[in-house]
Amino acid sequence: MSGYGPFRAQEMFLHLRDDGGATPLPVTPAFWEKLGSGQMPELEQGRLISTYTFAENWAVWERHPAGDEMVLLLSGAAEFLLELPGGLQSVAVTEPGSYLRVPAGIWHTARTQVATTMMFLTPGAGTEHRAV
């Protein structure tokens, strides 16, 4: 593997910087803990492309005040719940290659009953979490 790839999406995320550059980021066991504790301040700018596989409902709601998030289904199926000003909105994502847009600042969570892999394009600055 060179500095240009190929990379496995679940082992190497990609940070799209505001200056137009991109930096591959190795996904270590401590990645999410470091990100959540503010030890990766460079990710407060730009967007992070990450890939995540899950087979059960998320344990948290999250929201991204810095911008809209794009969530692309690679395999499986999921239902996203969006807490919109007018009430809870359910969005089923069942066809690989389809995506949803989560508006900036909207609390959201996901449910599934099958192994599901999704790619996320996330503006990380100010991301918040709360228990379901």
Image: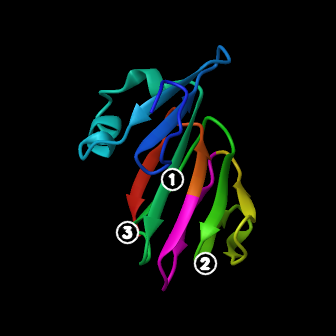
Residue at disc 3, secondary structure? loop
Disc 1 and disc 3: Cα gap in Å?
Answer: 18 Å
Q: Residue at x 64, y 19 (%)?
A: 18
| Quadrant where the C terminus is found in the figure | bottom left
Decide which of 76, 87 is in the foreground and name it.
76
Residue 115 position, x and y percent, is 47, 77
3 up-or-down from 36: above or below: above
Decide which of 129, 121 is in the foreground and name it.
121
37 up-or-down from 39: above or below: below
Residue 55 position, x and y percent, is 42, 77
Cβ–Cβ under 8 Å for marks 2 and 3 = no
**Badge 3: few (under 14), some or many (20 or more) residues near its Cα, within 10 Å?**
few
Residue at disc 1, secondary structure? strand
Disc 2 and disc 3: Cα gap in Å?
Answer: 17 Å
Type of amino acid under label 3: Ala
Would residue 112 be counted in the magenta stretch?
Answer: yes
Type of amino acid under label 1: Thr
Would residue 90 be counted in the magenta stretch?
Answer: no
Q: Give the range drawn in magenta.
A: 105-118
Q: Is residue 104 left or right of residue 111?
A: right
Q: What is the number of the mark on residue 77?
A: 2
Q: Is residue 76 left or right of residue 41?
A: right
Disc 1 and disc 2: Cα gap in Å?
Answer: 15 Å
32 up-or-down from 54: above or below: above
Type of amino acid under label 2: Ala
Q: What is the number of the mark on residue 51?
A: 1
**Residue marked by disc 3:** 59
Q: In which quarter of the view is residue 84 placed?
A: bottom right
Q: Which of marks 1 and 2 is nearer the N terminus?
A: 1
